[in-house]
Amino acid sequence: MRLIIKGKQFKVPQDLAEFAEQKIRKFEKRMPANAVIDLLFYDDRGPRGGLDKICEITLVLPGEKKPKYFSERSDSFRKSVNLIQEKLERELRKYKEKKNY
């Protein structure tokens, strides 16, 4: 599994990158070796605050025609990562069931 962590218009802090990598790497055993996860962080409203910390995942799985896109918005990047982790888990469960048939 290849994990790419990026920030849109800002540099992702090291502690946030490590937190996100730790959360996403949990699924490494359930994913094919050549899967790609592109994790993008951005602050929609800037310093004004609110529910504007967005985390997006683009998941490319082998054998799938189109990549899967997930997005979560909350008041902190860590909460967004936790929310998007649940969506990723559901999608990997579907992928595994589909491959078993």
Image: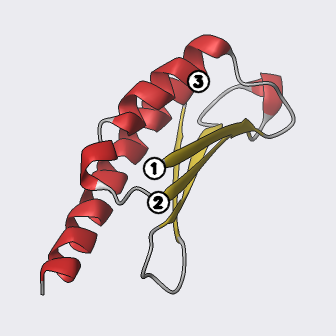
Q: Amino acid at mark 1?
A: Met
Residue positioned 54% across, 82% down in the render: 66
Label 2 to label 1: alpha-carbon separation: 5 Å
Residue positioned 71% across, 38% down in the render: 6
Name which of mark 2 and mark 1 comes first in the sequence: 1
x then y, percent, for residue 59: 50, 61
Element at label 2: loop
Which residue has dot 1 on it?
A: 1
Residue 24 shown left or right of residue 71 in the figure: left
x then y, percent, for residue 51: 59, 36
Name which of mark 1 and mark 3 comes first in the sequence: 1
Residue 9 shown left or right of residue 85 in the figure: right
Label 2 close to label 1 by CB (< 8 Å)? yes
Residue 86 shown left or right of residue 65 in the figure: left
Which residue has dot 3 on it?
A: 17
Residue 17 lies in quadrant: top right
Point out the residue furthest to the top here.
15
x then y, percent, for residue 16: 57, 19
